[in-house]
Amino acid sequence: MKTNIIQLQAGSVVELSLATVKSGFEQQLFEHYFPEVTPIVLGLGGKPLGSFSISHSDSILGNPKMGALFQWPSVDVFNQLHDNADFLKLKPVRDEALEFFSNGHFFLVNEDAQLTIEEAQTYAISTHQPREDHSADLLNLIAEPRTVNSDYPANNLTIALWSEDLFSKLNNAEIFKCQFNFPE
């Protein structure tokens, strides 16, 4: 079984992005947009941490089908991306391909952390209000106060192995049942 070790750097922020691709636009997004935008993101100091498919969600956002995690040095650097001329040329390519898109959800990395993801393992990514029991969490981050997307308030982001009883443990939570993508 393949594993992917995700390193998180203290002082950075992790962005959660959620989306649904329009039928027939997969090639446009995955073969045109992402290969061209990734060098721009990297050039600013951003880093893709991993993408995932979502098989079930309990969310005010509806039913996104995919998501991604990015690490940024700061929210200000993320904002620089959205002022970048090369990115602005690509943005319509992304927007045309997406039926649903919600990004700019930021969470603080207070200390260096490592997250090990296993291929074919099912995970729960959740955003929720603070809680006391973190025993099942593989990762727990607190919201960055200057999060860009204020339409989606959340105080914590956690990643845990999927279990059906998460719904009863996480009150007022957004939960996404997902599997991380691994390169071929």
Image (cartoon, rainbow, N blue to C red):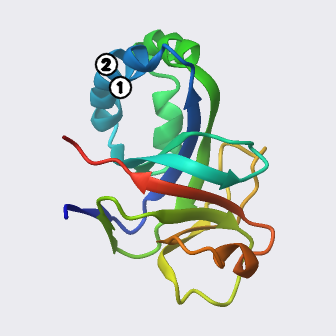
- Residue at the spot 27% in from the left edge and 48% down from the top edge: 182
Label 2 Cα neighbours within 10 Å, binned few <14 / some 14-19 / many ≥20: few
Residue hosting label 2: 31
Question: Can see residue 73?
Answer: no
36 lies left or right of 136: left
180 lies left or right of 128: left
**Which sits in the foreground, 66 or 17?**
66
- Where residue 179 appears, as percent x and y from the top left, is 43, 55
- Residue at the spot 48% in from the left edge and 15% down from the top edge: 25
> Which marked residue is nearer to the observer: mark 1 or mark 2?
2
Vertical arrangement, residue 172 with respect to residue 169, above or below:
above
Label 1 Cα neighbours within 10 Å, binned few <14 / some 14-19 / many ≥20: some
- Residue at the spot 34% in from the left edge and 47% down from the top edge: 181
Q: Which mark is residue 141?
A: none
- Where residue 171 appears, as percent x and y from the top left, is 79, 74
Q: Which mark is residue 34?
A: 1
**Which sits in the foreground, 163 or 76?**
163
Quadrant in the picture for the C terminus: top left
The residues bearing labels 1 and 2 have C-alpha atoms spaced at a distance of 7 Å
Q: Secondary structure at mark 2?
A: helix
136 lies left or right of 73: right
Question: On the image, which quarter does residue 175 sit in?
Answer: bottom right
Vertical arrangement, residue 90 with respect to residue 130, above or below:
above
Quadrant in the picture for the N terminus: bottom left
Tag 1–tag 2 contact (CB < 8 Å): yes
Name the amino acid type tagged 2. Answer: Glu
- Where residue 163 appears, as percent x and y from the top left, is 56, 75
Q: How many marks?
A: 2
Question: Can see residue 70?
Answer: yes
